[in-house]
Amino acid sequence: DAMVIQNPRYQVTQFGKPVTLSCSQTLNHNVMYWYQQKSSQAPKLLFHYYDKDFNNEADTPDNFQSRRPNTSFCFLDIRSPGLGDAAMYLCATSRRQGFDTEAFFGQGTRLTVV
Amino acid sequence: DAKTTQPPSMDCAEGRAANLPCNHSTISGNEYVYWYRQIHSQGPQYIIHGLKNNETNEMASLIITEDRKSSTLILPHATLRDTAVYYCIVRAGGSNYKLTFGKGTLLTVNP
């Protein structure tokens, strides 16, 4: 059974129209991550939550926001998508206990901006 | 975070062992080495991790040199389904538990 679920798998949005991607987990992990992966590139961390503590990467554009209403759910909001925001968006979770934790990834949402 | 260096691509014949190298010369004492792979259009998948001892699980073996400056991921009997990008990641400990991906190695398993 999938442990990190991303919906939808494919999302098409219009240029400038706000879009929200969702992620849910059944692992009860306290850390959740959002990554952006453009074609032929490695995943790039946008931000992560440790419980409700939000941690933004320094180079994440202001256009990207996130919400985590509870342990199980996390949302990625793109306020005004541009053509350059077309990418695969990956959600991941992990425990934060010591150094010995693995991250579990969802299957991603592929965002197309038209 | 310590940086890693991996070859951009490698080939392997089906049924043979695939040995994927990774250099992490600036690794610090409390950092683990993690390996993930990403099959095309899927999310990354955890493979294995280690601190200083060699590790083995049902997917792979991880060999870490004594000075911890490099490691090798070994897939003992590669199959076509092992074709993927393999990422070697050194993960900071303590309050910094971020997982930062480098460029990885594209392993192509050929029939």
Image (spheres, coloured by chain):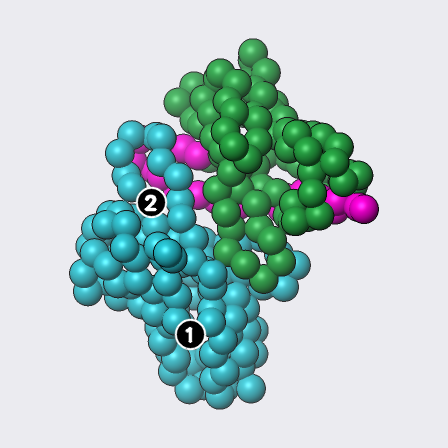
Chain colours: A cyan, B green
Reply above or below: A14 against B99.
below
* Amino acid bearing label 2: Ser
Which residue occupies 33% across, 45% down?
A94
Q: Do labels 1 and 2 share a chain?
A: yes
Left or right: where does residue A24 sit relative to residue B37? left
Residue drawn at (43%, 26%) of the image: B31
State the residue in front, A88 or A44: A88
The image quadrant where one finds the C terminus of chain A is bottom right
Q: Which span is picked out in magenta?
A: B91-111
Report x, y in % for residue B28: 46, 22
Neighbour tally class for label 1: few under 14, some 14-19, many 20 plus, Cα within 10 Å: some
Q: How crowded is mark 2: few (under 14 residues within 10 Å), some or many (20 or more)?
A: many
Answer with the quarter of the image where residue B107 lies: top right
- What residue does disc 2 label? A94
Seen in the image, is A1 located left or right of residue B71? left
Chain ID, mark 1: A
Question: For mark 1, what is the residue?
Answer: A8
**Residue B22 seen by the camera:** no
Q: Position of residue A85 (x, y in %)?
A: 52, 72
Would residue B2 be found to the left or right of residue B83 on screen?
Answer: left
Q: Position of residue A52 (x, y in %)?
A: 20, 54
- In the figure, A103 relative to A61: above or below? above
What main secondary structure does the magenta stretch of the protein show? loop
Three-letter code for the amino acid on which mark 1 is drawn: Pro
Q: How far apart are marks 1 and 2 (CA)?
A: 21 Å
Residue drawn 43% across and 58% down? A106
Left or right of B20: which side holds A28? left
